[in-house]
Amino acid sequence: MICVECGKEGKTYEGLCIDCYLKKKKLIEMPEKVEVVYCRNCPAYRLGNKWMKGNLKEDLKEYIKQQIEAKFPFQFEFDFESGKITCILEFEGRKIKKEKYIEIVEKERLCDKCSLQKGGYFEAILQIRGANEKDMKDIDKLIRRRISERDTFLLKKEEVKGGRDYYIGNKKVASKIAREIKEKYDAELSISSSLVGMKDGKRIYRDTYGIRLVEYKGKFVKIDDKLYRIVSAGKKIELEGMDGEKRYIYKDDLRKAVELDLKEREAIVLHEDEKGLYIMDTESYKTAFVNKPKNWKGKRKIKIVEYEGKFYAVGE
């Protein structure tokens, strides 16, 4: 074969010898510049049409690599500080190295998420009711963690009678969080939607997820003729017997128990020995012997309940 450019005989590529081919053909094309848009309100940055958070240097390197057009596989390096691109590819046993300095254009604006947040936008309300102080703290951490992981935002939270309301940017994220809380605490979940407007001819709805934790903690129940106090409730309910026994049951099993309306009151510890405590009820001034609670700390006063004429010490 003869090269149509120089007349050299031998193998040709699109009618050209290898030397002419490499001179005339662009085996690799690199961009002149790339644009990085930084959010003014959060650590997000945009490359192309995508907002992201993470390692800017690595993300920018990968983005630039995707903008390179090459006829053959190539090795790629990018120096973030200088903006220098180095590409090496192999063609017919020859290594071809191309280098280029590109311009990195930096701009600022609000990312999509912060723009919505600044505008007071939200798609769902998460209503938490019936949680005790400890559970509310744990739920608050869970909500914030999931919001951070799933790249939405918490517009605000409000303390209301009986609980707390969370205003969340994305309804899908709110739905997943609501179901996770329901599962973890065996809570009651209700879902409702309300029409808030129209967009592009479509109705826009806002969802409300009502989560109610049934407050079991501190209640007294009788199961199998034994008196128990409920100390915690999740997937399983933890019971503490008045004799110190620990027991775990499911919520459905609790329906078989007899709930007792017992009021805790204070008693004075008169004496302590290895077996238990001798106490005096501050209401009736009766004295009695009670089993020592497992978490007994040697205090002078203790909480008790009275059931069927007998006193029981209640742990903290």
Image (cartoon, rainbow, N blue to C red):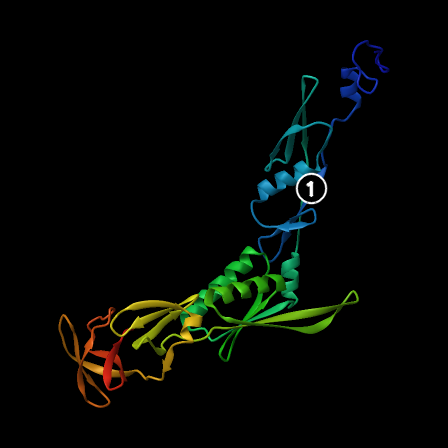
Q: Could you tell me which residue is drawn at 23 percent across and 71 percent down?
A: 296
Image coords of residue 194 (percent x, y):
67, 74
Image coords of residue 59 (percent x, y):
61, 42
Residue 170 visible somewhere in the drawing: no
Which residue in the protein does label 1 denote? Answer: 34
Task: Label 1: state its secondary structure.
Answer: strand
Image coords of residue 45 (percent x, y):
62, 50
Please indicate whether residue 204 sits to the left or right of residue 169 in the image.
right
Q: What residue type is labelled 1?
A: Val
CA neighbours of label 1 inside 10 A, class few (<14), some (14 to 19), many (20+): some
Given the current orientation, which residue lies at the most extreme top position? 9
- The answer to which image quadrant residue 255 occupies is bottom left
In the picture shown, does residue 37 fall above or below 143? above
Residue 209 visible somewhere in the drawing: yes
- The answer to which image quadrant residue 1 occupies is top right
Please indicate whether residue 315 sits to the left or right of residue 147 in the image.
left
Q: Could you tell me which residue is drawn at 62 percent across and 54 percent down?
A: 39
Image coords of residue 230 (percent x, y):
35, 73
In the picture shown, does residue 82 fall above or below 270? above
Q: Which of 106 and 146 is in front in this view?
A: 146
Q: Which of 286 and 18 is in front in this view?
A: 286
In the picture shown, does residue 57 fall above or below 273? above
Figure disc tally: 1
Q: Could you tell me which residue is drawn at 73 percent across and 72 percent down?
A: 197
Please indicate whether residue 86 sits to the left or right of residue 264 in the image.
right
Given the current orientation, which residue lies at the most extreme bottom position? 284
Q: In which quarter of the image is the C terminus?
A: bottom left
